[in-house]
Image (cartoon, rainbow, N blue to C red):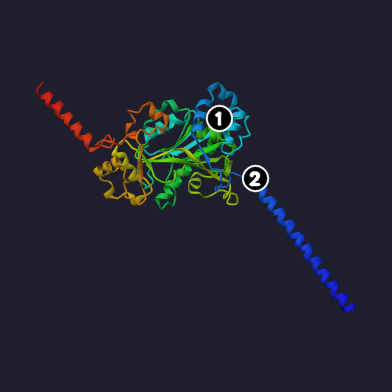
Amino acid sequence: MLLKAGRNSSYRRRWQWLLRTSRQYWRETILALLLLWLFARLNEQKHPFSSQPHAVTSSDISFQATNQPKPAQDATHHGFLPVKQARAFCQKQNWQPYPVRSTRRKIYDLFMLNDELDWLEIRLNTLSSTVDYFVVVESPFTFTGLPKPLTLKENWARFEKFHKQIIYHEVDKIPFGASRTWDYEDHQRNAMYLQVIPGLQGEQQANFGDVVLVSDVDEILRPATLALLRNCEFQTRLTLRSQFYYYGFQWLHRGPQWELAKATIYRGDNTILPADLRNGEGGNWITAWWDKAELWNAGWHCSTCFETVDEVLTKMNSFSHTSLNQEEFRNRTRIIDRVRNGLDLWDREGQVYDRIDDNKDVPEYLKSDSERFKYLLDRDGPNAGFRDGAFNKLVRLVEAGKRQHRHGHG
């Protein structure tokens, strides 16, 4: 009897232990699931694979154009939309309105300049009403280490209208120990922030929560995109997906939208540096997987969109992709033919461009002077829109011959 009673007591203890363990397990499981659910709700749109993507729509573009704050309103509301409008505007992206409205949330547009003066003009005129400061950085050296002129410095008077908004900086030195072209590029890109932003004072000084844009001069954002970024809380790493064109707005790249224009939030010493932001590096690795998002249709990227063949050749000499700067690709006649027919200059696999005639989705500034910027809108014709191509040279020679003939008979 005693043996049997002892066995029963042992079974009961085991069952009690299993029951307690099971209850504890389920309590912990339920608590963990609850915490995960709360985390998911709080960060519903911060995961890059969200089922509700962020995108700038035609209605957003119309809304921004209609509700752009006038100068008097801008001073009163610090550039923000009225709260009710901001809530509706941000809610479409599943974002919340930016909560600190007592001071202006400034937007800094950081980019490097080589010799793309037309693109600088287009960018400034497109974004000057929505950007607070353009941080423009020039270097006396290309990414390949070749000396080059300081184009904006030499043409400063051309952009007098924007002098109060431009923060100009010349990169002061070549990075120590640089061995690759990408080292030069990263150094110049980070100089846009490290050599400029910390030293700003007065009205130009950056405050926590301000918006920092990082892109190239030919990656132009829509004003509606910047209205969203000023008025809404957004992820620390925001990819500004852009319509991707080659040679001009007549040739749309087939495939995903361009992904290298970025936005982040100023956090003092914890601000993500431009090169890290563009390359998907740096920052807090613990939160990096969820504190990022993509905003589609946020702007335009127009690659190798130049008025002259000389500019195309300069780009080949300057950029970090040294493998593409081969003599076979530098033939002027070949360049003109490729641009006119929408074919890749470098015969890269998968690089296909779809023709769009009479494209209306272009920066408004181009529409205001379509004849001057015709080379960005129409690449047809024997010279593919290039001002210095063989056909134009022939025309100039003929005209010069006619003038000489008239002078000889004068």
Q: Amino acid at mark 1?
A: Glu
Horizontally, is 3 left or right of 193 in the view? right
Write the residue at 45% across / 40% down: 242
Query: Is 195 in front, or is 248?
Result: 248
Please identify the quarter of the rendering in which residue 188 is found.
top left
Asked whether residue 195 is in view, the answer is no
Q: Which mark is residue 41?
A: 2
Q: Which mark is residue 297?
A: none
What x and y, as percent, mark residue 34?
A: 70, 50
In which quadrant will I find the N terminus? bottom right
Mark 2 Cα-neighbour bin, 10 Å: few <14, some 14–19, many ≥20: few
What x and y, as percent, mark residue 385?
A: 29, 35
Q: Amino acid at mark 2?
A: Arg
What x and y, as percent, mark residue 278?
A: 48, 46
Q: Residue under circle 1?
A: 203
- Return the disc, 1 or 2, that comes first in the chain's sequence: 2
As helix, strand or loop, the secondary structure at mark 2 comes to helix
